[in-house]
Amino acid sequence: MPQIFHFIFIACCCIIFSSRMEAQPTSQYDDLRRYIGKKSIAVIDSAKLRITYSLQYVPDSTKPQQILKDRKILLIGDDLSHFYSYYVRQADSALTADWDKGKNSAPLKQPADMLGEGYDIYYRYSSGKQTVMEPITDLSTYRYEENDATPQWTIGDETATILSYNCQKAFTRFRGRDWTVWFATDIPLNAGPWKLRGLPGLILKASDSRNHYVFECIGIEQLRQIKQPVIMIGVSRLIKCSRDEYRKAQKQFYENYVNALLALGFNVYVQDDSGKTIEEIATPNKEFEERHISWSTKIDVADRYRKIPYNPIELE
C-alpha cells in the first residue's frame, strides 16, 4: 500500500468531522459545503485571485532520485492568503461524501508519485501574521502563529519569461534552505508558494539549492464574478503551540513507522518472512471505534521499528 500517503492523507481528512465553527456560508458556497461538511467551516475571506503551482519534492534526502508531486493552490483575498494542497482537498471531498452517506471508505488510491502535503498556511496582510495548521499525530491538528516571518531577499540581475511574464531572479536563505526564485513585477503581489513572499511581485517559480522542493506556477485565474471562499476548517482536537513544538511533534511522528500507523487508526499486523502474523497491535485511537470504522495494514517484521523518510521543507 502507498504507506506515506496514508499517514498525511488520513490525518488531513479526519479533521473535518468534529468542528465547532460558528460562521455559516451563503448559498454560493454549496459546492464547498458538499465536500467539507455543512457545519465545519468558517469563511474568513473571499479570494479574488487563484494561483496554481506544481510542486516536485524529495521526501527522503538519501534517495534524491525518488520524486513526489503535489498541486498547490494559493488564494489571494482582500486581506488574507491561503496556501494548501489541491490533492488533499480533493481526497477530503471524496471521503467526506462517502462518510456522509454512511459508507466506511478506505483511503483513496492515488498515482504512485503523487502525495499531497497536509498543511494549510494563512497569511494576513494587514498584520503580517501567519497561521500554519497541520494534522500530525493522534488525529490532532497542530496550529501555530508567526509574526512577520518574511524572508530577506537579494535581488539579482538575471531575467526569465515564465507564463509570458517577465521575471527577475532573487535569492534568500530561509529556514535552513537556500532558495532561488523568479518573481513578476507585472503582478504586484506580495505573495508566493509556501512561506516565500516579500518581493515586489508574485513569485512564479522557486527552488531550493538541492532541488528537493521545486514550485512552479502553472496557472493564474482572476475570480471576478464568483469569488472562491477562503475557508478555515474547524477541528475539535486543536493543539495551539509554538513553531518549535510543532516541529518537534512532526519529527516524532516520523521517528516510528508503527506508532504513526497506530495513531492514525490502523490496526497493525506484523508478519514474518513466510507471511505468518507474529504480532497484532490494536490502535489506541478510540475515535475510529466510535465511528465503527476499522482499518488495518500488514507490515514485514523488518519494518517493525523503522523510521519514515523525513525531509521537511523547514530544516531549522
Image: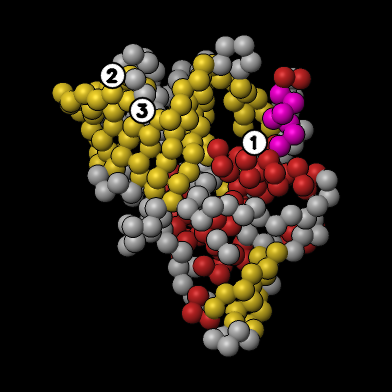
Q: Does the magenta stretch include residue 50?
A: no
Q: Is residue 272 above or below residue 52?
A: below
Q: Mark 2 points at which residue?
A: 166
3D distance between C-alphas at marks 3 and 1: 27 Å
Residue type marked 2: Asn
Spatial separation of the CA atoms under disc 3 and disc 2:
10 Å
Q: Residue at x 70, y 37 (%)?
A: 36
First-in-chain label (3 vs 2)? 2
Label 1 residue SS: strand
Q: Which percent across, then down, holds residue 9?
A: 59, 51
Dot 3 and dot 2 residues touching (CB under 8 Å): no
SS of the residue at dot 2?
A: strand
Q: Which mark is residue 204?
A: 3
Q: In this rendering, which labeled residue sits more in front, label 3 or label 2?
A: 2
Which residue appears at 55% of the width and 61% of the height? 2
**Mark before the other along the chain sequence, 3 or 1:** 3
In the image, residue 34 lies in the stretch drawn in magenta: yes
Which circle, 2 or 1, is nearer the viewer? Answer: 2
Q: Name the outermost residue toward the right.
A: 102
Residue 82 visible within the image: yes
Q: State which region is magenta.
A: 29-35
- Identify the residue shown where x is 73% and y is 31%: 33
The answer to whether 9 is drawn above or below residue 20 in the figure is below
Residue 131 percent location from the top left of the image: 50, 34
In space, the residues marked 2 and 1 are separated at their CA atoms by 36 Å
Disc 2 residue crowd, few under 14, some 14–19, many 20+, Cα 10 Å: some
Magenta stretch secondary structure, dominant: helix
For mark 3, give the secondary structure.
strand
**What residue is pinned by disc 1?**
233
Residue type (three-letter) at the residue carrying disc 3:
Leu
Residue type at numbered disc 1:
Ile
Q: Which residue is drawn at 36% across and 14% down?
A: 188
